[in-house]
Amino acid sequence: MRVSEFLMPTLRETPAEAEVVSHQLMVRAGYIRKSAAGVYTLLPLAWRVIKKIEGIVREEMDREGGQEIMMPIIQPAELWQESGRWDVYGPELFRLKDRHGRDFCLGPTHEEIITDLVRGEVSSYKQLPLLLYQIQNKYRDERRPRFGLMRGREFIMKDLYSFDRDEESLDVSYWKMYRAYTRIFRRCGLKFRPVEADSGAIGGNDTHEFMVLAESGEALVVYCPNDSCGYAANVEKAVSPPERPVYETGARPLEEAATPEMRTVNQVASFLGISPKTLIKTLIYKTEKGPVAALVRGDRDVNEIKLIRAVGVINLELAPPEEVERITGCAPGFAGPVGLGGVKVVVDEEALMANAVSGSNKKNIHFVNVNAGRDFKPDLVTDIRLVKAGDPCPSCGIPLAEARGIEVGQVFKLGDKYSKVLGATFLDEKGQSRPIVMGCYGIGVTRTMAAAIEQNYDQNGIIWPSSIAPFQVVVIPVSAKDIRQDEMARRVCEKLLKAGVEVIIDDRNERPGVKFKDADLVGYPVRITVGSKAVDSGDLELRLRRDGNNIMIPEADLVNRVLEILSEDQEITDAG
Ligand code: ATP
Ligand code: MG
């Protein structure tokens, strides 16, 4: 392949709207162009990377017995009405009508379609287990499409669905996929961590997200730094043993304390000369089941996902100031549980302490010596706090660490959530009809490409892991007009191509500096320079993108050295 003929429009300027590195570099290096918010054309370089990632995904899915199919992107509304998701999926679902006015949607995921297929084709335990997958565009009208390929409205996903006879067999399918995902992301050269994740209001219990660790990640994960322990969880799901209060035991009489204009925990705590840990923070939420007061210790934050589960609601959001005022009878900043009527009071385990300080629902006044049971009645005491770095690991007790992550994949036990409502059943050995037990497993292919860049770049551009690079080697004749250099460059390319190396030659009539800059920007793992010295001496200059080292190699050894370098970079390819 020749750069002169290849559509690779590189830019010198960083596009203004690109906030994260992968987005900036993909636009600058000529990988993608935008059509609409969250909708992109993948240019030849990007498409080559995508095909590499898809190839790895396909190999590992097939290795575990996955069978590839292709389901329709356009899905009839009837199926979604049958599963009940037509109404609950909300504005993220792209909906459309055909010429007869019938409703359809563009598939954001394929549980409905595949369960419909399987209920028609599978009837006996003898046909299970079954693993079916596809690699296809998905459509989600995201509230905030952003970060280029990271959060698009149209994106490529691999989705596999497992069908088993019982939980035990589902467990086998689940861990097959877990292992396959581990191999896939390793082979893509990524530093990642599988973490326990929230499984949503209904549906299965076990689920893990695969997080690529990167500063730009939208997710926060906590993990145990002790590798032999290995606990890791999305912060939405993370748990940690409650800290035992060391303060008070016997209840003292309730008192009022003046706290003029002291609205925040820190203001109140320092004004009263107490630790934020002795304070109860009261947050008022609105839900479809009415208002909820969430009480956590002053130094803690509410984990809204845990709160949603605890209260059993679908929608939950902080009440706006006027609503807080209506509910508590007081301006925000002074809400407290004592005397609060018509509100469900949910108390975090740690906030259940003796002689606490809390808001009084009266302006500029806090209560001192608040005691649950005596001064207010909790409706529910449970874990609703957000775990943070430094909290003890729930499995070994040492302080947890924190990192940001990009969710590139998720494995999920669905159980009989879809098979029950859609009637996908099978007959067991005894001839009894039972719902099929399902799992679903997604990988964001386009997001994985973006995540790989977030982890592999420097100030000059992308540094591709060789397993997913668009080309493994670029050959640069210093002067394309010099016939001897041109000849030698072509010869080197031929040899590499014959050895199965993907190589591109930068035959443009440009200054060498321009070609070197573009090579760094595009991110080829290996660069080979052919200048007049190479022609005279027969030694070529080989430069590794990752460490920037130059090595001189005689032409006769070149192919073997390149193969060696690439296989070192891919040594984990056959892991597992
Ligand atoms: P997120 O929480 O980031 O919105 P999700 O949990 O809704 O993602 P899943 O339904 O688990 O996503 O989809 C499987 C995979 O598809 C995700 O792990 C992610 O890699 C990818 N993915 C999901 N939404 C997008 C998107 N808008 N753009 C690109 N990739 C996406
Ligand atoms: Mg997910």
Image: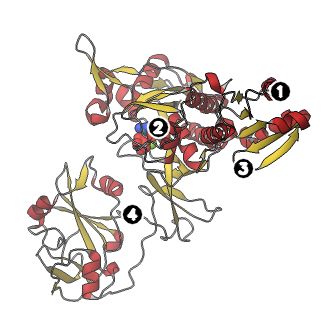
Task: Confirm whether residue 576 shows in the render.
Answer: no
Numbered label attached to residue 548: 3
User: Helix, strand or loop at disc 3?
Assistant: loop
Name the residue carrying label 1. 484
Report x, y in % for residue 324: 14, 62
Camera-side residue of 264 and 69: 264
Indicate the amino acid at tag 4: Leu
User: Helix, strand or loop at disc 4?
Assistant: loop
Report x, y in % for residue 299: 35, 74
Mark 3 or 1, nearer chain start: 1
Mark 2 or 4, nearer chain start: 2
Q: Quadrant of residue 254?
A: bottom left
Left/right placement of residue 166 relative to residue 255 reads right
Mark 4 → mark 1, Cα distance in angstroms: 66 Å
Q: Quadrant of ligand 2?
A: top left
Indicate the amino acid at tag 3: Gly
